[in-house]
Image (cartoon, grey):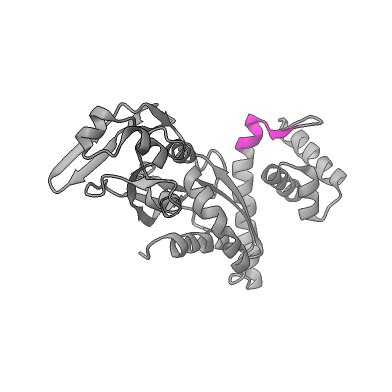
């Protein structure tokens, strides 16, 4: 058995969730890819894949092996590229995770430009507001909003995300326009966010000069950014969301900015990746592209 080829085949099957797509990308018969993984399972003495007629997924042991195998294959590809002088034409596969609203509203529409610039890089995009374990889940990098907590990762700042307080016209027609944070707290419905891991609700925050007011007890809340946007559009209350996400709906008249004299502190957006000695060329160019496209230069 060619163990490196088998490892490469396994990584590609997990990345694509398909024997057929993996065989196409590797230019190998599907039966060969299947046999390579079967031989690899026998060699390792563990089951790597759950296979049925309808589903294909790595086992717990397979997912752990995938994380190590993917990094090893990436490093070998990078060594080959260096030897062949291909550093200026990055290629290969990237596994990226990003928050839901940023991924759907900003990142995905811009990926066509990334592909135009780097056509030999494929991207698997995980979309979730939960904190992804980069190493454990085999991600090359994650994009996160908020305070950095994983100090074992390298973090590059992308931007400071500003907030808007807003509500749908239908809500304001029913309940009127809030005139202050206190009025909002006493007389209005609020839509907000809660953290998936802890269930802790995030208050609406208002600052003006030295004043700071936090308003909680939302009538409706969600743990996902797109869900919060949809709650606001549905007229379920007044809420706060990133300006870059809701500005389109403000311009279209589907949301209306309220309490403009009060602001909320911006939230930093970072791209994080493991501190590998051999950071792949494709991860480098993706990181620089994200910063160039969405944010600030350090």
Q: On the rendered structure, is 33 left or right of 102?
A: right
Residue pushed farthest front?
173
Task: Determine if residue 2 is in view.
Answer: no
Does the magenta-highlighted stretch encompass residue 57? yes
Residue 131 location (% of width, % of height): 45, 38
The residue drawn where x is 60% and y is 43% is 68
Q: Which of 200 and 182 is in front in this view?
A: 182
Residue pushed farthest left?
210
The residue drawn where x is 22% and y is 33% is 183
The residue drawn where x is 82% and y is 31% is 53
Give the answer, above or below, for where 248 lies relative to 47.
below
Give the answer, above or below, for where 188 lies relative to 261.
above
Give the answer, above or below, for where 158 lies relative to 215.
below
Residue 174 location (% of width, % of height): 36, 33
Residue 14 location (% of width, % of height): 69, 42
Q: In which quarter of the image is the N terminus?
A: top right
Q: Which quadrant holds residue 58?
A: top right
Question: Which residues lie in the magenta part?
Answer: 55-64
Q: On the rendered structure, is 85 left or right of 128?
A: right
Q: Nearer the viewer, residue 197 or 110?
A: 110
Task: Determine if residue 16 is in view.
Answer: yes
Tell me how many marks there are: 0
Residue 185 location (% of width, % of height): 25, 30
Does the magenta-highlighted stretch encompass residue 104? no
The residue drawn where x is 63% and y is 73% is 85
Q: Which quadrant holds residue 120?
A: bottom right
Q: Quadrant of the C terminus?
A: bottom left
């Amino acid at each position: 058995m060619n163990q490196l080829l088998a490892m490469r085949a396994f990584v590609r099957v997990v990345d694509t969730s398909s024997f057929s797509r993996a065989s196409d990308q590797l230019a190998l018969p599907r039966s060969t890819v299947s046999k390579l993984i079967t031989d690899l399972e026998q060699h390792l003495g563990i089951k790597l894949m759950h296979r049925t007629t309808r589903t294909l997924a790595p086992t717990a042991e397979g997912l752990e092996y995938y994380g190590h195998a993917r990094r090893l294959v990436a490093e070998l590809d990078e060594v080959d590229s260096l030897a062949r002088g291909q550093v200026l034409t990055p290629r290969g596969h990237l596994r990226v995770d990003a928050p839901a609203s940023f991924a759907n509203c900003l990142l995905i529409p811009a990926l066509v430009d990334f592909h135009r610039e780097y056509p030999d890089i494929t991207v698997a995009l995980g979309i979730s507001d939960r904190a992804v374990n980069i190493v454990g889940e085999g991600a090359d990098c994650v994009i996160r909003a908020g305070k950095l907590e994983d100090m074992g990762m390298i973090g590059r700042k992308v931007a400071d995300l500003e907030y808007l307080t807003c509500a749908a016209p239908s809500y304001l027609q029913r309940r009127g326009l809030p005139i202050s944070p206190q009025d909002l707290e006493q007389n209005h419905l609020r839509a907000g966010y809660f953290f998936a891991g802890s269930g802790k609700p995030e208050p609406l925050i208002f600052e003006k000069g030295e004043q700071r007011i936090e308003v909680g007890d939302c009538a409706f809340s969600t743990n996902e950014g797109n869900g919060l946007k949809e709650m606001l559009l549905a007229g379920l209350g007044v809420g706060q969301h990133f300006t870059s996400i809701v500005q389109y709906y403000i311009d279209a008249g589907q949301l209306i900015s309220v309490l403009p004299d009060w602001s909320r502190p911006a939230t930093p957006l970072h791209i994080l990746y493991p501190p590998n000695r051999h950071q792949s060329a494709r991860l480098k160019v993706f990181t620089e592209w994200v910063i160039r496209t969405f944010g600030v230069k350090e």
